[in-house]
Image (cartoon, grey):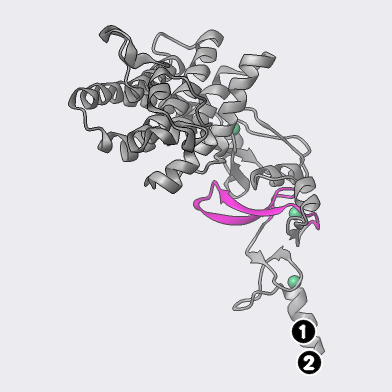
Protein backbone atom coordinates (compact mmCIF):
# COMPACT_ATOMS: atom_id res chain seq x y z
CA UNK A 1 0.00 0.00 0.00
CA UNK A 2 2.90 2.32 0.63
CA UNK A 3 3.26 4.86 -2.12
CA UNK A 4 0.08 3.62 -3.84
CA UNK A 5 -0.71 7.18 -4.84
CA UNK A 6 2.43 7.28 -6.98
CA UNK A 7 1.41 4.39 -9.20
CA UNK A 8 -0.71 4.20 -12.33
CA UNK A 9 -4.48 4.67 -12.17
CA UNK A 10 -5.08 0.93 -12.36
CA UNK A 11 -3.42 0.48 -9.00
CA UNK A 12 -4.77 3.54 -7.28
CA UNK A 13 -6.28 2.37 -3.98
CA UNK A 14 -7.18 5.24 -1.66
CA UNK A 15 -6.67 4.15 1.95
CA UNK A 16 -10.39 3.69 2.61
CA UNK A 17 -11.07 1.68 -0.53
CA UNK A 18 -7.95 -0.34 0.17
CA UNK A 19 -9.05 -1.11 3.75
CA UNK A 20 -12.53 -2.06 2.61
CA UNK A 21 -11.00 -4.31 -0.05
CA UNK A 22 -9.14 -6.23 2.67
CA UNK A 23 -12.36 -6.43 4.65
CA UNK A 24 -14.46 -7.68 1.71
CA UNK A 25 -11.82 -10.31 1.04
CA UNK A 26 -11.79 -11.43 4.69
CA UNK A 27 -15.57 -11.63 4.97
CA UNK A 28 -15.85 -13.42 1.63
CA UNK A 29 -13.46 -16.14 2.81
CA UNK A 30 -14.98 -16.45 6.27
CA UNK A 31 -18.57 -16.61 5.09
CA UNK A 32 -17.75 -19.34 2.58
CA UNK A 33 -18.55 -17.40 -0.58
CA UNK A 34 -17.01 -20.30 -2.46
CA UNK A 35 -18.38 -23.08 -0.29
CA UNK A 36 -17.37 -24.10 3.23
CA UNK A 37 -14.10 -22.31 4.01
CA UNK A 38 -10.99 -24.45 4.41
CA UNK A 39 -7.94 -23.81 6.61
CA UNK A 40 -6.18 -21.80 3.92
CA UNK A 41 -9.21 -19.52 3.38
CA UNK A 42 -9.36 -18.90 7.11
CA UNK A 43 -5.65 -18.18 7.33
CA UNK A 44 -5.79 -15.47 4.67
CA UNK A 45 -9.05 -14.16 6.10
CA UNK A 46 -7.33 -13.49 9.43
CA UNK A 47 -4.38 -11.76 7.76
CA UNK A 48 -6.69 -9.65 5.60
CA UNK A 49 -8.95 -8.80 8.53
CA UNK A 50 -5.99 -7.59 10.58
CA UNK A 51 -4.82 -5.55 7.57
CA UNK A 52 -8.36 -4.13 7.27
CA UNK A 53 -8.37 -3.09 10.94
CA UNK A 54 -5.07 -1.24 10.60
CA UNK A 55 -5.85 0.36 7.24
CA UNK A 56 -9.37 1.52 8.12
CA UNK A 57 -8.45 3.04 11.48
CA UNK A 58 -5.56 4.88 9.85
CA UNK A 59 -7.70 5.95 6.89
CA UNK A 60 -9.92 7.84 9.36
CA UNK A 61 -6.88 9.38 11.08
CA UNK A 62 -5.55 10.40 7.66
CA UNK A 63 -8.86 12.13 6.81
CA UNK A 64 -8.49 14.23 9.95
CA UNK A 65 -4.76 14.89 9.78
CA UNK A 66 -2.16 12.73 7.99
CA UNK A 67 0.38 13.42 10.75
CA UNK A 68 -1.76 11.34 13.15
CA UNK A 69 -0.80 8.20 11.23
CA UNK A 70 2.85 8.70 12.12
CA UNK A 71 4.29 7.14 15.26
CA UNK A 72 5.91 10.51 16.01
CA UNK A 73 3.29 13.06 15.02
CA UNK A 74 5.74 15.96 15.39
CA UNK A 75 8.14 14.46 12.83
CA UNK A 76 5.54 14.52 10.05
CA UNK A 77 6.94 15.29 6.61
CA UNK A 78 4.57 15.45 3.63
CA UNK A 79 7.13 14.21 1.09
CA UNK A 80 8.14 11.22 3.18
CA UNK A 81 4.49 10.56 3.95
CA UNK A 82 3.60 10.32 0.26
CA UNK A 83 6.56 8.01 -0.31
CA UNK A 84 5.44 5.79 2.56
CA UNK A 85 8.81 6.40 4.17
CA UNK A 86 7.78 6.50 7.84
CA UNK A 87 6.74 4.20 10.65
CA UNK A 88 3.05 4.34 11.38
CA UNK A 89 1.31 4.00 14.73
CA UNK A 90 -0.10 0.71 15.98
CA UNK A 91 -3.76 -0.22 16.42
CA UNK A 92 -3.97 0.75 20.09
CA UNK A 93 -2.48 4.21 19.55
CA UNK A 94 -4.63 4.72 16.45
CA UNK A 95 -7.77 4.07 18.54
CA UNK A 96 -6.58 6.41 21.29
CA UNK A 97 -5.97 9.17 18.75
CA UNK A 98 -9.34 8.54 17.11
CA UNK A 99 -10.96 8.89 20.53
CA UNK A 100 -8.98 11.83 21.89
CA UNK A 101 -8.04 13.91 18.86
CA UNK A 102 -10.53 13.04 16.11
CA UNK A 103 -13.26 12.48 18.73
CA UNK A 104 -15.13 9.83 16.79
CA UNK A 105 -18.61 8.78 17.88
CA UNK A 106 -17.97 5.00 18.01
CA UNK A 107 -16.89 3.82 21.42
CA UNK A 108 -13.91 1.57 20.71
CA UNK A 109 -11.79 0.45 23.63
CA UNK A 110 -8.05 0.73 22.75
CA UNK A 111 -7.67 -2.55 24.66
CA UNK A 112 -10.69 -4.14 22.94
CA UNK A 113 -10.58 -7.85 23.65
CA UNK A 114 -11.68 -9.00 20.21
CA UNK A 115 -9.13 -6.76 18.46
CA UNK A 116 -6.37 -8.02 20.71
CA UNK A 117 -7.46 -11.62 20.14
CA UNK A 118 -7.34 -11.02 16.39
CA UNK A 119 -3.88 -9.47 16.67
CA UNK A 120 -2.50 -12.42 18.59
CA UNK A 121 -4.16 -14.88 16.22
CA UNK A 122 -2.46 -13.09 13.33
CA UNK A 123 0.89 -13.23 15.14
CA UNK A 124 0.51 -16.92 15.81
CA UNK A 125 -0.22 -17.55 12.14
CA UNK A 126 2.77 -15.49 11.04
CA UNK A 127 5.36 -16.67 13.53
CA UNK A 128 4.45 -19.76 15.49
CA UNK A 129 2.26 -22.00 13.42
CA UNK A 130 -1.30 -22.45 14.44
CA UNK A 131 -3.97 -24.95 15.28
CA UNK A 132 -7.63 -24.05 15.55
CA UNK A 133 -11.04 -24.93 14.19
CA UNK A 134 -12.64 -23.05 11.34
CA UNK A 135 -15.72 -22.28 13.42
CA UNK A 136 -13.59 -20.88 16.25
CA UNK A 137 -11.94 -18.41 13.88
CA UNK A 138 -15.26 -17.54 12.27
CA UNK A 139 -16.85 -16.90 15.66
CA UNK A 140 -13.89 -14.90 16.93
CA UNK A 141 -13.90 -12.60 13.93
CA UNK A 142 -17.59 -11.69 14.26
CA UNK A 143 -17.09 -9.13 17.08
CA UNK A 144 -14.25 -7.49 15.11
CA UNK A 145 -16.39 -7.31 11.97
CA UNK A 146 -19.25 -5.92 14.01
CA UNK A 147 -16.99 -3.25 15.48
CA UNK A 148 -15.51 -2.34 12.08
CA UNK A 149 -18.82 -2.17 10.25
CA UNK A 150 -20.20 0.12 12.99
CA UNK A 151 -17.09 2.31 12.83
CA UNK A 152 -17.23 2.57 9.03
CA UNK A 153 -20.95 3.44 9.01
CA UNK A 154 -20.78 5.96 11.85
CA UNK A 155 -17.37 7.52 11.60
CA UNK A 156 -15.92 6.96 8.14
CA UNK A 157 -18.51 7.00 5.35
CA UNK A 158 -20.14 10.31 6.43
CA UNK A 159 -16.71 11.98 6.13
CA UNK A 160 -15.81 10.84 2.60
CA UNK A 161 -15.92 13.90 0.36
CA UNK A 162 -14.62 12.49 -2.95
CA UNK A 163 -17.72 11.34 -4.91
CA UNK A 164 -15.93 8.49 -6.72
CA UNK A 165 -14.40 7.24 -3.49
CA UNK A 166 -17.80 7.40 -1.75
CA UNK A 167 -19.34 5.45 -4.61
CA UNK A 168 -16.66 2.72 -4.49
CA UNK A 169 -16.95 2.51 -0.71
CA UNK A 170 -20.72 2.14 -0.84
CA UNK A 171 -20.48 -0.70 -3.37
CA UNK A 172 -17.90 -2.46 -1.18
CA UNK A 173 -20.17 -2.01 1.84
CA UNK A 174 -23.03 -3.73 0.01
CA UNK A 175 -20.83 -6.75 -0.62
CA UNK A 176 -19.65 -6.62 2.94
CA UNK A 177 -23.11 -6.50 4.52
CA UNK A 178 -24.20 -9.53 2.50
CA UNK A 179 -21.15 -11.56 3.50
CA UNK A 180 -21.37 -10.45 7.12
CA UNK A 181 -25.02 -11.48 7.30
CA UNK A 182 -24.14 -14.85 5.85
CA UNK A 183 -21.47 -15.30 8.50
CA UNK A 184 -23.64 -14.22 11.44
CA UNK A 185 -26.48 -16.47 10.20
CA UNK A 186 -24.01 -19.34 10.23
CA UNK A 187 -22.97 -18.57 13.81
CA UNK A 188 -26.64 -18.42 14.85
CA UNK A 189 -27.10 -21.90 13.37
CA UNK A 190 -24.11 -23.20 15.29
CA UNK A 191 -25.46 -21.66 18.49
CA UNK A 192 -28.80 -23.40 17.87
CA UNK A 193 -26.94 -26.69 17.61
CA UNK A 194 -25.63 -26.01 21.14
CA UNK A 195 -29.07 -25.31 22.57
CA UNK A 196 -29.37 -28.63 24.37
CA UNK A 197 -26.13 -27.86 26.27
CA UNK A 198 -27.11 -24.26 27.02
CA UNK A 199 -30.83 -24.42 27.77
CA UNK A 200 -31.68 -24.23 31.49
CA UNK A 201 -28.21 -22.76 32.22
CA UNK A 202 -29.01 -19.20 31.09
CA UNK A 203 -28.62 -17.90 34.67
CA UNK A 204 -24.99 -19.07 34.76
CA UNK A 205 -23.79 -18.64 31.18
CA UNK A 206 -21.44 -15.76 30.39
CA UNK A 207 -20.44 -14.30 27.01
CA UNK A 208 -17.11 -15.63 25.71
CA UNK A 209 -14.34 -13.04 25.70
CA UNK A 210 -13.15 -14.35 22.33
CA UNK A 211 -16.23 -14.93 20.23
CA UNK A 212 -18.72 -12.79 22.12
CA UNK A 213 -21.35 -15.55 22.28
CA UNK A 214 -23.15 -16.61 25.45
CA UNK A 215 -21.50 -20.03 25.46
CA UNK A 216 -19.37 -20.18 28.63
CA UNK A 217 -21.35 -22.21 31.18
CA UNK A 218 -20.11 -21.57 34.73
CA UNK A 219 -21.08 -24.86 36.24
CA UNK A 220 -20.05 -25.72 39.76
CA UNK A 221 -16.39 -26.20 40.51
CA UNK A 222 -15.15 -26.74 36.96
CA UNK A 223 -11.38 -26.62 36.43
CA UNK A 224 -11.51 -26.54 32.65
CA UNK A 225 -14.04 -23.89 31.72
CA UNK A 226 -14.28 -23.43 27.97
CA UNK A 227 -16.45 -21.73 25.40
CA UNK A 228 -18.78 -24.30 23.86
CA UNK A 229 -18.82 -22.45 20.55
CA UNK A 230 -15.25 -21.38 19.81
CA UNK A 231 -13.44 -23.69 22.22
CA UNK A 232 -11.51 -20.95 24.05
CA UNK A 233 -10.06 -22.39 27.27
CA UNK A 234 -10.46 -20.44 30.51
CA UNK A 235 -9.03 -22.78 33.15
CA UNK A 236 -10.46 -22.64 36.67
CA UNK A 237 -13.33 -20.42 37.73
CA UNK A 238 -10.98 -17.94 39.40
CA UNK A 239 -8.68 -17.80 36.35
CA UNK A 240 -11.72 -17.26 34.12
CA UNK A 241 -13.06 -14.48 36.36
CA UNK A 242 -9.73 -12.62 36.23
CA UNK A 243 -9.55 -13.03 32.47
CA UNK A 244 -13.08 -11.66 32.15
CA UNK A 245 -12.10 -8.45 33.92
CA UNK A 246 -8.98 -8.24 31.76
CA UNK A 247 -6.42 -8.81 34.50
CA UNK A 248 -4.86 -11.55 36.57
CA UNK A 249 -4.62 -12.11 40.31
CA UNK A 250 -0.84 -11.81 40.02
CA UNK A 251 -0.99 -8.43 38.27
CA UNK A 252 -3.59 -7.10 40.68
CA UNK A 253 -1.78 -8.19 43.81
CA UNK A 254 1.69 -7.06 42.65
CA UNK A 255 0.25 -3.66 41.70
CA UNK A 256 -1.32 -3.22 45.11
CA UNK A 257 -4.87 -4.03 43.98
CA UNK A 258 -7.12 -6.43 45.81
CA UNK A 259 -8.55 -9.84 45.18
CA UNK A 260 -11.92 -10.39 43.52
CA UNK A 261 -15.02 -10.31 45.68
CA UNK A 262 -15.69 -13.36 47.81
CA UNK A 263 -18.66 -15.63 47.21
CA UNK A 264 -21.22 -15.90 50.01
CA UNK A 265 -22.11 -19.42 48.84
CA UNK A 266 -18.79 -21.21 48.30
CA UNK A 267 -16.28 -18.83 49.90
CA UNK A 268 -13.87 -18.55 46.95
CA UNK A 269 -12.77 -15.17 45.60
CA UNK A 270 -14.15 -15.53 42.10
CA UNK A 271 -17.10 -13.13 41.98
CA UNK A 272 -17.35 -10.48 39.28
CA UNK A 273 -20.23 -8.71 37.61
CA UNK A 274 -20.83 -9.51 33.96
CA UNK A 275 -23.82 -9.94 31.64
CA UNK A 276 -25.41 -13.40 31.70
CA UNK A 277 -27.47 -15.14 29.04
CA UNK A 278 -30.71 -14.59 30.97
CA UNK A 279 -30.15 -10.81 31.22
CA UNK A 280 -27.66 -9.91 28.48
CA UNK A 281 -28.23 -6.15 28.77
CA UNK A 282 -27.15 -5.76 32.39
CA UNK A 283 -24.34 -6.96 34.62
CA UNK A 284 -25.08 -9.60 37.24
CA UNK A 285 -22.89 -10.63 40.18
CA UNK A 286 -21.85 -14.23 39.64
CA UNK A 287 -19.32 -16.56 41.21
CA UNK A 288 -17.22 -18.14 38.45
CA UNK A 289 -16.40 -21.04 40.74
CA UNK A 290 -19.80 -22.30 41.90
CA UNK A 291 -22.03 -20.46 39.42
CA UNK A 292 -24.15 -18.80 42.13
CA UNK A 293 -25.57 -15.40 41.32
CA UNK A 294 -25.81 -12.74 44.01
CA UNK A 295 -27.82 -9.55 44.42
CA UNK A 296 -24.76 -7.48 45.23
CA UNK A 297 -21.68 -7.05 47.36
CA UNK A 298 -21.94 -6.32 51.06
CA UNK A 299 -20.21 -3.01 51.82
CA UNK A 300 -19.16 -4.30 55.25
CA UNK A 301 -17.59 -7.70 54.52
CA UNK A 302 -17.04 -7.44 50.72
CA UNK A 303 -18.77 -10.79 50.22
CA UNK A 304 -21.19 -11.15 47.33
CA UNK A 305 -24.52 -12.20 48.78
CA UNK A 306 -28.22 -11.51 48.84
CA UNK A 307 -28.53 -8.15 50.54
CA UNK A 308 -30.92 -7.07 53.25
CA UNK A 309 -33.67 -5.00 51.58
CA UNK A 310 -32.85 -1.27 51.52
CA UNK A 311 -29.36 -1.95 52.95
CA UNK A 312 -25.97 -2.49 51.25
CA UNK A 313 -25.38 -5.27 53.73
CA UNK A 314 -25.58 -9.05 53.86
CA UNK A 315 -27.80 -10.71 56.48
CA UNK A 316 -24.78 -11.87 58.55
CA UNK A 317 -23.41 -8.35 58.87
CA UNK A 318 -26.90 -7.06 59.56
CA UNK A 319 -27.34 -9.49 62.45
CA UNK A 320 -23.95 -8.60 63.91
CA UNK A 321 -24.95 -4.95 63.86
CA UNK A 322 -28.29 -5.74 65.50
CA UNK A 323 -26.53 -7.73 68.21
CA UNK A 324 -24.27 -4.77 68.92
CA UNK A 325 -27.17 -2.49 69.68
ZN1 LIG B 1 -16.11 -18.37 22.41
ZN1 LIG C 1 -19.20 -19.41 44.71
ZN1 LIG D 1 -21.49 -8.73 54.95
- Reading the image, the residue beneath label 1 is 321
How packed mark 1 is, by other alpha carbons closer than 10 Å (few <14, some 14-19, many 20 or more), is: few
**Could you say whether the residue bearing mark 1 is in a helix, strand or loop?**
helix
Q: Is residue 175 left or right of residue 72?
A: left
Nearest to the observer: residue 309 or residue 64: 64
Residue 112 in sight in this render: yes
Looking at the rendering, which quadrant does residue 78 occupy?
top left
Tell me what residue is drawn at x 64 percent, y 27 percent.
231
The reply to whether the magenta stretch includes residue 276 is yes
Kind of element beneath mark 2 = loop
Q: Are the residues flagged by discs 2 and 1 in contact, CB closer than 8 Å?
A: yes
Residue visible at 73% across and 59% down in the picture:
261
In this picture, residue 116 sits left or right of residue 256: left
- Image spot of residue 317 (x, y percent): 76, 76
Total label count? 2
Q: CA distance from mark 2 to mark 1?
A: 7 Å
Camera-nearest residue between 93 and 166: 93
Amino acid sequence: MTGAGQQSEDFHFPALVNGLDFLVSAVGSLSGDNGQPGPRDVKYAVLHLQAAVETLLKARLEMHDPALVWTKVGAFDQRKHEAGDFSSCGVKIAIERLRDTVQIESKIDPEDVSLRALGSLRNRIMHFGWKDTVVAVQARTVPVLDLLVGFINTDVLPHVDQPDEAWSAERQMEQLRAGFKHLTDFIVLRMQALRSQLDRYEHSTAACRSCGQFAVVLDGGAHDLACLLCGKQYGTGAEAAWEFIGSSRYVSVTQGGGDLNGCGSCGTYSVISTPLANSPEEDSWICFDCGSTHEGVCTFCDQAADLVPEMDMCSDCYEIRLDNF
